[in-house]
Amino acid sequence: MTAKRVLIVGAGPGGLTAGMILAKRGFDVSIYEKQAQVGGRNAHFEIDGYRFDIGPTFLMMRFVLDEVFAEAGRDINNYLDICQLEPMYRLAFREKTLDMSRDHDVMRDRIADAFPGEAPGFDRFLKREAARFKAMKPCLEKPYSSLTDMVAAPLLRALPHLSVGRSVYDVLRGYFRPDILRTCFCFQTKYLGMSPWECPAAFAMIPFIEHEFGVEHVRGGLSKISQAMARVVEEHGGQIHCNTPVKQIQTQNGRATGLLLENGETVQGDVVIINADFAHAMTTLFAPNTLRKYTAARLQRKRYSCSTFMLYLGVNKTYDDPHHAIYFADDYHANINDITRRKQLSADCSFYVRNAGVTDPTLAPEGKSAIYVLVPAPNATGPVDWEQERAPMRDRVLSLIKTRTGMTDIDSHIEVEKCITPADWQANDIYFGATFNLAHNLGQMLYFRPHNRFEEIDHCYLVGGGTHPGSGLPTIYESGRISANLVSQEHA
């Protein structure tokens, strides 16, 4: 019996996850990637010996990664060198700094020292959010292909934990009184590109996941994960074609039949899996009038995440700053509203710095550092002119780094640098430059998010941040596993 042929558009984390699982199960897998390397936003680049992850730098829910490698018949420890970070990260406000620990006893003591009387709130947080995570986890591991899935047992059991009508920040009010301490346990909504004052309360489990399972680092950078997945795909006989962009997904009688490549070649297949940015794929990869639900006009009306302004700095010295650190604007709420509602730049912005050299010296030449800086920014639906703002924003961010971190002389030690603005993300086929994809409001979750089994085209599946369960590496891996299982079920 001839193996069913699976064609995957894009070698990002979701496509690679689905590819290695399906290749292990005997499918004939071919992945087509427009870039010269695998990974998508989970890839890397190098300049003069400095190595930078393009996108994700936090590894959470390591167990999901372990599981998908195991489903592909591999032990992740044979491919990656992964270590726990302690502290997980530093959170810095003008008046206080808190190093966040996975050790609950250490964390409780640090809260008691910095915020007298607030330690009992941490215990309430752990207990309540553990229950929420236990209830929600099965809901994130199954597809929602029809409305009947919304009344299936896992989701019905989880309903009391959804806290419908409340935000993540509302939930944190129930644990802590100081606004700063609430922010320490709700800023994680930025992983979804959303405001904690708007993000649905169900996502209050994200900080619990960090405190329960920790934050980890992959030696060489998180892009090593994608490279390891590509190895597994090829070990199982799958093929990965880099520098091979897809021009169009071919359809006939409402089903996907193959791909038309930019080079003019046509590839026939039994299944097509889309791992491109969702809205970009819908507006560019199908022939006109093929789609009815996801038309350009309807996609423009959907809600999208924020974007990011990025600086990648190769500096000729090392610093003692922590591996991960987040520095908050004096008025964090106003800063978030500028980004998500007013779509404008804040005079005082929040920013994140990864100084991975304190953990991993392989990312830069000896005695030097590869510094990664991320600033949440409005997506391209706003009026910001990034051609004009690129240089001023770069200078403003460097000034903040000099005044708020231990890198007080960083500007005089920069050897190489690269900047990516929301306009650059958009030019690189990310719809509206929304780096975290579709927003995660209630109207765009579960059944109401684009389905893993694509509802518009038969024999077509979605993986990545634009489908269920959502954005962020662990959930993207889960999307790849869900779609791989759906393909396997369809083809017995």
Image (spheres, rainbow, N blue to C red):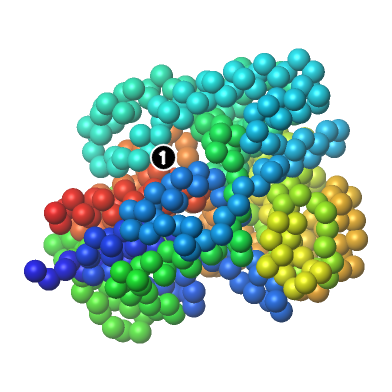
Q: In the rendering, at what x and y percent does residue 476 appear?
A: 43, 51
Residue 447 is situated, as x and y percent measured from the top left of the image, at 32, 38
**Residue at label 1?**
444
Give how far across and how far down residue 192 sits, in percent: 54, 44
Tell me the SS state at disc 1. helix
Residue 284 in view: no
- Name the residue at 56% across, 50% down: 59
Q: Is residue 486 left or right of residue 355?
A: left
Q: Residue at x 41, y 57 (%)?
A: 75
Query: In terms of depth relative to the viewer, which is nearer, 168 or 296?
Result: 168
Can residue 227 be spotted in the picture?
Answer: yes
Q: How many marks?
A: 1
Q: Which quadrant of the structure image shows residue 491?
A: bottom left
Residue at 25% of width from left, 79% of height from top?
266
Residue 456 is situated, as x and y percent measured from the top left of the image, at: 25, 53
Q: Is residue 133 above or below residue 15?
A: above
Neighbour class for label 1 at 10 Å: few (<14), some, many (≥20)?
some
Q: Is residue 284 above or below residue 445?
A: below
The quadrant the N terminus occupies is bottom left
Q: Is residue 448 above or below residue 85?
A: above
User: Foreground residue, 133 or 81?
Assistant: 81
Q: Residue at x 59, y 22 (%)?
A: 125
Instruction: Give amino acid for label 1.
Output: Gln
Q: Relative to residue 41, is residue 392 drawn left or right?
A: right
Q: Nearer the viewer, residue 270 or 339?
A: 270
